[in-house]
Amino acid sequence: MSRTLPGPSDHVVVVGAGLSGLSAALHLLGAGRSVTVVERDPLPGGRAGRLDLAGYRVDTGPTVLTMPDLADEAFAAVGDSLYDRVELIPLHPAYHARFADGSSLDVHTEADAMAVEVRRFAGAAEAAGYRRLRAWLEQLHRVQMRRFIDANFDSPLGLLNGDLARLVALGGFGGLDSRIGSFLRDERLRRVFSFQALYAGVPPARALAAYAVIAYMDTVAGVYFPRGGMHALPRAMADAAADAGAELRFGQRVTRLERSGERITAVVTDQNRIPCDAVVLTPDLPVAYGLLGRRPRRPLRLRHSPSAVVLHAGTDRTWPQLAHHTLFFGAAWRRTFDELTRTGRLMSDPSLLVTRPTATDPGLAPPDRHLHYILAPCPNTDVGPGVRAWADLAPRYRSQLLRELERRGLDGIEAAIEKECLVTPATWQLQGHAAGTPFSAAHTFAQTGPFRPRNLVRGTENAVLAGCGTTPGVGVPTVLLSGKLAAARITGVPRPPSARARTSPPPTKESAV
């Protein structure tokens, strides 16, 4: 059994109403705790926020939901249901991939549909390899979820269990590139099932095969989009928490924590003082450690994931070759990852993600208008251009990206933009994200599982961390779990999922993409 906080925990203050904080709040409420959630912004969501650009309703963070049962588990803790509050639209295809040689591929999460598409794209042998890869991804997920992802660690000794041997037998500690290559020979297909390592901040050539579990979430488990945008999820979680008795205080910035010895006795905001028995801190790690006045001792400095430039563009037209998600792969691959993680240069041959949420939910834009999010991975401010450099670099890089998309078939895109918002690493850093990246600490081996910054902090008895910088890591499913694991540090062993929690969403009205 993992450690829990000593002493009373009747009233818990959760700092931050992002996905991790709201998940923690719901699990705490379900365990009978009184909960106050304090959020600096006027709306819930954190990274999964909302921006209104003259009628364009822009999600500022994640663009899809995978593994929705993990979100539903938080609702079920208070006898509620994600599926009663949010309409989830399955995306078919989950992605559309376009390659530098002019070829293209629809990425389906349904096995037979994807096998047919792979056969068309690369032949029968690759389709058979895809089925073997899918079976391996499913095994990898089963082995990792219960003991390595949905788990609190008190020391590396927590790794020593039967599932570790199973993970070793599955090749989880080999290289990701070589393991994917053992199933698929076509280099373009290998990219589709390995680019996800970038979410974890590790190039596929240097990533452990265990990180393919991220590809499982994207290419096997199903990809969904909430009606009303991704912000509908934190909004529904906040509503469920309020209905279950939580007090939600928006527009309040936490300025300090009052202490008595090793215990936090109150959370102080710019408006009032809130006494507490325990606190859950969800800001990025440097902010949380600053409030605590404590920093864990680590032999090596934390390495952070690459960042991203995002252009949110409201346009008066769209392009028929765009799905909800379209991946534009450049010809370069290894060089691109070296630029992002080692040399600190902007991509010389960029791979880009263009998201068109209005393909699924036209109501996110004014009539006859469209939303496009153009995401370009870039170095973080530790290895690449710093905050000041982006003041001059941002407009030039925006123009460069739009010219590149014009070259790749989105003719007239710059002229079509009516409203826009450009986000750069400088933006992220000003929002409090270390190294100017919203993707937090990279998932190197030394920063994964029991080696990742723990959700308990030495020298403070009644504080616990949640969010993408701590256990288990980056991504919507894992951030939701981080809130659950933080709550478990306060309440004890997590309750088993409610009978209301489903392993997959109920049938919904599907939207052609």
Image: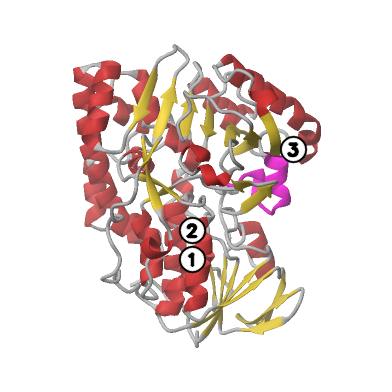
Secondary structure beneath dot 1 equals: helix
Secondary structure beneath dot 2 equals: helix
Secondary structure beneath dot 3 equals: loop
Is disc 3 surrounded by few (<14), some (14 to 19) or many (20+) residues within 10 Å?
some
Alpha-carbon span between mark 1 and mark 3: 36 Å
N-terminal of the two: label 2 or label 3?
2
Decide which of 133, 8 is in the foreground and name it.
133
Decide which of 57, 257 is in the foreground and name it.
57
Alpha-carbon span between mark 2 and mark 1: 6 Å
> Can residue 193 be seen from the camera position used here?
yes
Q: Which residues are magenta?
A: 422-439
In this figure, which residue is indicated by the disc labeled 1? 237
In this figure, which residue is indicated by the disc labeled 2? 233
Q: Report the number of numbered marks.
A: 3
Residue at position x 45%, y 76% in the image: 28
Q: Quadrant of residue 496?
A: bottom left
Is disc 2 surrounded by few (<14), some (14 to 19) or many (20+) residues within 10 Å?
many
